[in-house]
Each structure stands twice: as C-alpha cells, then as structure tokens.
Image: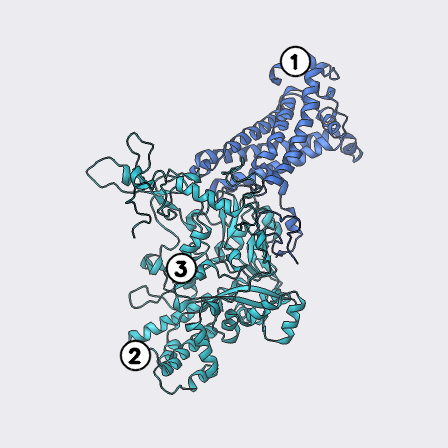
Amino acid sequence: MNPMTTAPTEPALQHAAAEPGTLGVLLWVILPYVVLVLFIGGHVWRYRYDKFGWTTRSSQLYESRLLRIGSPLFHFGILVVLIGHIGGLLIPHSWTEALGITEHTYHVTAVVLGTIAGVSTLGGLAILIYRRRTVGPVFSATTRNDKLMYVMLTLALVLGLAATVAANFIGGGYDYRTTISPWFRSIFYLRPDPGLMTGVPLLFQLHALSALALFAIWPFTRLVHMLTAPLGYLTRPYIVYRSRDTQLGTRAPRRGWERVR
Amino acid sequence: MKVMAQMAMVMNLDKCIGCHTCSVTCKQAWTNRSGVEYVWFNNVETRPGQGYPRRYEDQETWKGGWELNKRGRLTLKAGGRFKKLITIFSNPKLPSLDDYYQPWTYDYETLTNAPLQEHTPVARPKSLITGKDMKITWSANWDDNLGGAPEHGDKDVLLAEISEKVKFEFEQTFMFYLPRICEHCLNPSCAASCPSGAIYKRSEDGIVLVDQDRCRGWRMCVTGCPYKKVYFNHRTGKAEKCTFCFPRVEVGLPTVCAETCVGRLRYIGLVLYDADRVLEAASVPDDTELYEAQRSILLDPNDPGVMAAAESDGIPRDWIEAAQRSPVHALINTYKVALPLHPEYRTMPMVWYIPPLSPVVDAVSGTGHDAEDRNNLFAAIDAMRIPVEYLAELFTAGDPVPVDSVLRRLAAMRSYMRDINFGREPDASIPAAVGMSEEEMYEMYRLLALAKYDERYVIPPAHAEKAHGLEELATECSLDYEGGPGMGGSGPFGEASGGASPVAVENFRMLHARQTGDSVTDPADKASRVNLLNWDGKSTPKGLFPDRPGGEGGPPAELMDGTDPNAESEPKP
C-alpha cells in the first residue's frame, strides 16, 4: 500500500488520462471519502463527547519568547496557505479567466505568495517544534497525540512546499488546475474522477495523500481549535449575560422531574 | 431603568489580621488541582507591597481594564476586537509564570528513604512545572508583613503615585492587609476580552463565570482583567476564576473565604443596580468621579419605585427583601464607609472595602496620646497624609476626600462608643461632626462590630430548590449516567478531556487518586502525587512511607491496615 513503491513511473506520466487501476480508485476515490467521513463525523463526535477538551492548549504560560516569533509566523503563514489552497483548488480555471487573470499572472502570484507563505509557515513550525522539544515544561506537556499531529503536519507542509519548489524552480511549472483541482472538486460533486490524478507528479500525489492523512486525524488532535476561530467576537456585544443553567447537575432530569418555572 | 441584582461583598480591612485562612480554604476548595498550582482565587496582600501577581496594578505594563479613548468612549485598554484577533496567536501582554511564581513541592520522600549518612537528609524544593530541583525566590505572599520591604518596597506601583516618600523603616511605616477575590464587576473587562464569549455575567446574581465548555484558551481574559483574577490552567488549557462559590451561594451559604474568615470581616449581600446606566457611569471623564458614579447606579431597595421596577424585571420578592436587609448596601450607601478597589479601572468592581483606620490609631497610640479621643484621631487623619494618600490610590483613584470622610466616620464611631461602653453620657456632637445621627452611628457600630452570621451574610437562595436533581441525594443512583463510575482518568485528548462526570464521582476519584498516588513531583501524572496538605491522615499514599524490604511498599502493615487494635484511628495533633 506504500504509494512510494507503487506510484506511477516516469513513462506513465506521459499518458495523463490513463486508466486509474485498483490502486488509483483506492487512493483517489475511496480514501478521500473515508477521510471526509472521519473529518466531519470526528468533529461532530468530538464536539459532543469532549467539549471540555476543545481548546488551543496554549503553552504560553511556560514560555513566551520563542512563541512570540514562532506562533504568529506559523499561523499567519498557514492562513495564507489556506487561502491559496481555496483559490487553487475550489475556484475553477474558467472563473479566473473570466475575470481577465491570465494563466501566467495567476501562476506567478501563486508561486510567489505560496513560496513566501510556505517558507514562513515552515520556519514558524520549526521554531515551535524546537521550542516544544527544548523547553522543559512545554515538552512535558506534550502528549503522544501532539507528537503524531506534529509529524503529520510537518509532512504535509514539507511535501507541499517541495512539490511547489520542485515543479517551479527545477521543472518548468505544473498546472495543477487542470488535474488536481478538478479531481478535488469532483469528490464534492459525488462524481469522483481518479483518472485525473494518475498522471500527477509524485510529489503532488504524496502531498495530497499526506494532507488526507492529516485531515483524518484532525478531529482527534488539538487542531480542532481551528474550527472555533473566534470570528464571532467581531460582532457580539462586549458583555455576555446568561441566565443560570436551568439544569442542575450534569445530567438532564428525567421526564416529569423537570424544574417548575 | 433595568433593575438587576448583584451578589456583592464588603471587607472591613481594620479587622484583617493577615492570617491567610481565606486563601488556604479557598485553595483547598477550588484550586487544589494540577494546572492551577500557582492560582489563588483568594489572596491576601500586605500593603504597601507588590501584590500577586507582582505589580499587577501597573496597567501601563499589563493593559488591564478599560480606558476612555480620545472621543471619550469606553474602550479596552489592551485594544479592541480587531487587535485582539490579530494578536491571538501570541498574547503580547500575558504575565509569565515568573510574574506569579513557580509553584513547588518538597521531595519529602528523601527524608524517609535516604541511606544512612553523616548529614541529615533534606527535602529539596521541586518545581511543580518542570519536576526539577528549583530555588524558591517568590510566591503569592513573599512580601508578607513587609518582608523584604527595604529591598522590594519601592516596587509597589501605588507608591510611585504618592507625593511623599514612604520610609520602610521600623516604626516609621504603616501596613495593612488587603484580601482580594474576583471583583465580579458590573462592567467586566475579562468578559469583554474573551474572543469565544465564554465568560459571562449571570443575569440573576451578577456572578461572573467562565463556561469551561466554551473556553478555547485564547488567554485574552488574563490580560483584560486589571486585577489579574482570571488565571490560565496550564494543564487543561482553560481560563479559571473565582466563582463566588456559586454552588454555596445558590443554597444560601456564604463563600468559603467568608465562611472561614476568623476576623469575620466579610459581608455578603445583594445590591440592586440600574443596568442601563452602567456604561454611562463607567464613562465619566474624571477618574476621581468614578466612586460617586458607581455608588449612584446602586439603587435604594426601599424605594417603592425601585421595588416595583425590580419586580417587573423579574427579581423575586424574597430577593428584594434580601436586598433591603443587605449589609453590603448599608455599608456602601447608607453609612458610606465602603469603597471600591481601583475604580479607575472602570470595570465597576463589586467587592468593596472599608479602609483601615488602624495605621492612624497605631500612630496616635504610639506617641502616647489617647487613640480613642475624637480630636486626636481627627487631627491625626489630617496630619498623616501618607496612609490617606495611599488608601486614596487604592480606593478612590487618588482623591483623598472620600477616604478622609470614611476614616473620620470610623474614628467618630470609636470615640462615640467609648462613652457608651464606659457608661458615660454619649456625646451627640460626635456623630453630628461626621454627618450622622446617634441611631445611625449605633447601628453602624452594631453592623461592624456585633453582626452575627445571618446579619453578615444575607444570601437569598437561588430559585432552584429541586432536590431530586442534586447529585448527592439518593433519590436515584447517582452513578447512573453514561460511561458509569468505573471510567476514571481522562479521555484520549489529554487531561480532563471527555464528558463531565457527576461531582460525587469526581470527588470520589480525586480522593482515591490522592490517597493512592505514589510519586512526589510528576506533573505529567496528577494521579500520582502526594500533597501533604490534602492528606487526611487516614489513608496510606504510596511514596509517603519508604518501601519495605521485600514488600510492595507502603507503611508497616500492622500500623496502617486497620488490623492493629492499638492503632490510632485519628492522627495525633
């Protein structure tokens, strides 16, 4: 099942529309749907089961000198990366063309922004991992779950950056908007087309697979804090008033035993 | 007018002897857990002193509370919503653990299992954060009783505001104690700072709470609170704060700190306030007007108009009656002897203080003069500018007039009551000199000196009398819930993750964990720690006694397993 050994070889790249084969269907049809179920179902389950554990688990109290540099570097970087992926994967080629953005302009913008964001994200992550390993209290507050998450996150980031750099600075550029992006969208149309992915360069394939793996473990790690980014803060009133819980204790009262108002 | 009820507290600082019983009982009740080792919901500071965390009053550094912007509108001092979200990845104004202190325990195990050696083994301090040996350099009350004042005294933030130099020399200085809990403000800046909206003010009794299920650990509340009374639990990644012991208050009991106060200096009661005027009162331009502005939004519960409005706003009848009997309302608005702590933070704090007369009394009696004579005391209040100015920095944003007036009332009461106690004719001119009638003065004396439990704590129970829902009652099996009592420990996402378990089960598990824990300093596993403060003397935590050769550890069986007929059932004092 290791994609390294079974990935298409160079000659296979020439026939982009080749038959996907069993492995192709497994990797580019079945796996994405499994991950999708895990990602959505996992979040729902986690939110119902573990609201109390749904937190950033900040370690700023232990150490703030390195965090002050590393954390914003990583987070702002990854936000730009996220926006870039939305632009690249979700927005079809024809839409940007209709806006008058030429392929060249799009490509240059994407590569420049993507590389800057990718490098700062990776740099921030490197600082954060260094901090996590060397600062005693931070390290002792690191769970095995965290370590797995860091491995998967770093893998996806490194492969993504490597694919971009390899395609654009070593190769002559790769137009993923004709292969990967339609495949990605096809999953959500419920008409998955694994054939689009067979001819994609190996690094891009590995990046996609590592991202799928990251999404699969996402709801079960501290990454869940992303889904509750506090954007509501911009609009809510400053002071929140709440009535005391009508329910006493941690269990809902049985039918017929509810409080009388 | 929108009438709301607020559970509030007044502390009479003249009676505080700085025994820290409130702090210790509070800690035992609420923050006796890993992750909050450094947290004191209630702490007692010696003033002058730096406080806890160190120099928390320096808002130019910590940016807590509210301020008026250039247009005269109330804004968070640490920046508005947008700035909060921009700096959310690394809060630039979060106190570090060193600003509080590194919590520690001692390696007691060495005392019992050290090999025979020339020197007596010592219990080294171990950091509860790193688990390593540490040097103790500070704690929550390291400058207790002005300890280290010659070196650290000038670090008191308020002293910088005072015109005269305070001398930290014996017999030339003054000191008093300041117990502090969360202020449960009418305009809480911690709640306003919370990006998740997890901190809320209860509309029934005004208690400010953190919803632990909605807190995401963004840490902005710690910065937002100018009193630094919201703390970050570094194990669970959630903010925690004083809860005004709401489970007790809801059933009519006073808070743990008030219940256990040996000086009986705390008063708890309701005040009614006009919620529509809070913002207006918090926005008055001059800092020194804030005390009066805050007093003015507190409503008179005996006013028929207020009573009618309160009832129409859904405040129960017995709550209005409790507000009428409230000692807090009497001390704040009838006798006008209680003052708010740092009104200049514009949060409208609701734990008020009667400033101490003792620095003045001590100084007068120190000179050999009669310290209960009205004229001596009044003259001393006029002459002793340093204590008065210092108190004014604490309670009235630097305006000495209200502090003067309170101290004069207290001095007058002292002098008026002496005549009565000596069986002499009471002098009506004494209360008149401070604008009070003789009856008022005697009633104030009764409240300050004689008030019994039910007069000091006028707490109407919450309208939730529903015994069946309470955890501890045996109307149904209290272990009957999803997952069952056998679960124990934490979920897969780190400490304390997973669904909530009933309080009774949680207490049972914690007690079990405490009694069977075996290592001294391993913050990675809270279940394996022996805290001697928690040990009730009856159980046998592993690690408390040295391993028996060949045995499994633990104390000699004949001593501790309960089979020895001569064994003590209670530890000797």
Tell me residue A169's x, y (percent): 63, 24
Q: Amino acid at mark 1?
A: Thr
Tell me residue B100's x, y (percent): 42, 51
Image colour for chain A is blue
Given this view, does label 3 or label 1 mark the residue nearer the observer?
3
Q: Which mark is residue B45?
A: 3
> Tag 3 or tag 2, which sits nearer the N-term?
3
Instruction: Report which residue position mark 2 lands on.
Output: B369
The answer to whether residue B6 is above or below residue A158 is: below
Chain of the residue where label 2 is placed in the rendered structure: B
Q: Amino acid at mark 3?
A: Glu
* Circle 2: element type: loop
Q: Could you classify mark 3 by the number of other residues whose Cα lies within 10 Å: few (under 14), some (14-19), or many (20 or more)?
A: many
Q: Are marks 3 and 1 on the same chain?
A: no
Q: Nearer the viewer, residue A175 or A141?
A: A141
In contact (CB < 8 Å): disc 2 and disc 3: no
Q: Amino acid at mark 2?
A: His
Q: Could you classify mark 1 by the number of other residues whose Cα lies within 10 Å: few (under 14), some (14-19), or many (20 or more)?
A: few
* Circle 1: element type: loop
Q: Is residue A177 left or right of residue B215?
A: right
- Kindly indicate which chain is depicted in cyan in the rendered structure: B
Q: Is residue B415 left or right of residue A50?
A: left
Chain of the residue where label 3 is placed in the rendered structure: B
In contact (CB < 8 Å): disc 3 and disc 1: no
Chain of the residue where label 1 is placed in the rendered structure: A
Examine the image and state in which quarter residue A43 appears.
top right
Examine the image and state in which quarter residue B178 appears.
bottom left
Instruction: Report which residue position mark 1 lands on.
Output: A9
The answer to whether residue A232 is above or below residue A217 is: below
Given the current orientation, which residue lies at the most extreme top position?
A11
Q: CA distance from mark 2 to mark 1?
A: 102 Å
